[in-house]
Image: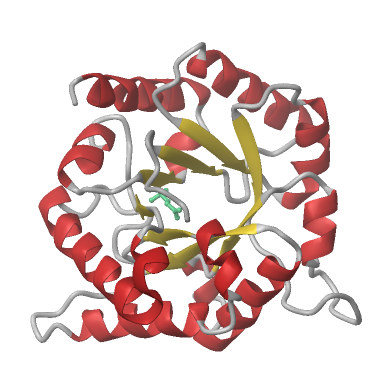
Amino acid sequence: MQMKKEVPLIVANWKMNPPTVADAKRLLEATKRAMGSSRSYDVIIAPPAIFLRELAKGYKGKRIQFAAQNMHWEPSGSFTGELSGRQVKDAGASYVLVGHAERRGMGETNDDVRKKMAMAAANNLKPILCIGESERRPDGEYWRVIGEQLVTALRDVPKNKLKDIVIAYEPVWAIGAPSPMQPEEMHGTTIYVRKVLGREHGRPGMQLPILYGGAIDETSAGAMLTDGYVEGLLVGRASVDGRQFARLLEAVRSSQARR
Ligand code: PGA
């Protein structure tokens, strides 16, 4: 059974950046330099799929793993513009983001996410399952939204693959926003997500790492890890500027040193 992660997992979601493969290589180098010899965190980079093979092939270390930002739920066929699980695995990904809010915003449904989760499992890809409500109203409807996203997504994942899953809670209203959710509010959400996972999947469900994503930068990373009770962060904008990401990683390191 997977034990809770001992060091935080920092996922760099580059989204549709940077512009060229040469820039992508430079950003990977900057990230490697920033990590130095620190053992305070693990890093996963999710570059645009078209850079994946080149980056993964050129990387000789063990400390960075690569993720695809998306994949299709069918193994092959007439799906113009899509990528299969097998293809992203073959390109060097060991993880895949599933159900990112920006994909859901383009029409991806809970049911699509469920099928992708099953396909990721079938290809031995570790899914980073993204969930999160688009708004938080006082009536608490968002709890139902999050619960349903979780329950549906995990429905077809075989029991023995449950341990490979990483949950990334990203409130849609915080993605791309000036500031993240308050860590204390995240703590309440972490408890709820864990409760749903425990109810549905017992102890193995309760052990899954939960990450926070949405407007995290070097000023908020440390507090989110310690006061949000999360096992890692999913970082967008602050991961595509090498110097800023270095500052963020340093903030993560020093928050762990204080623990
Ligand atoms: P952001 O994006 O850090 O730029 O808000 C996070 C994400 O969408 O994963």
Q: Tell me what residue is drawn at x 41 percent, y 48 percent.
A: 3
- In terms of depth relative to the viewer, which is nearer, 154 or 179? 154
Residue 133 in view of the camera: no
Q: How is the image coloured?
A: secondary structure
* Residue 102 spot, x, y in % from top left: 51, 66
Left or right of 1 on screen, residue 76:
right
Q: Tell me what residue is drawn at x 34 percent, y 53 percent.
A: 214
Q: Which image quadrant: the C terminus?
A: top left
Left or right of 225 on screen, residue 112:
right
* Residue 234 spot, x, y in % from top left: 43, 48
- In terms of depth relative to the viewer, which is nearer, 108 or 43? 43
Left or right of 66 on screen, residue 155:
left
Q: Tell me what residue is drawn at x 10 percent, y 86 percent.
A: 139
* Residue 210 spot, x, y in % from top left: 36, 55
- In terms of depth relative to the viewer, which is nearer, 227 or 156? 156
| 171 versus 30 height, above or below | below
Residue 203 in view of the camera: yes
| 101 versus 92 height, above or below | below
| 111 versus 220 height, above or below | below
* Residue 232 spot, x, y in % from top left: 37, 44
Q: Can you tell which quarter of the image residue 121 is in? A: bottom right
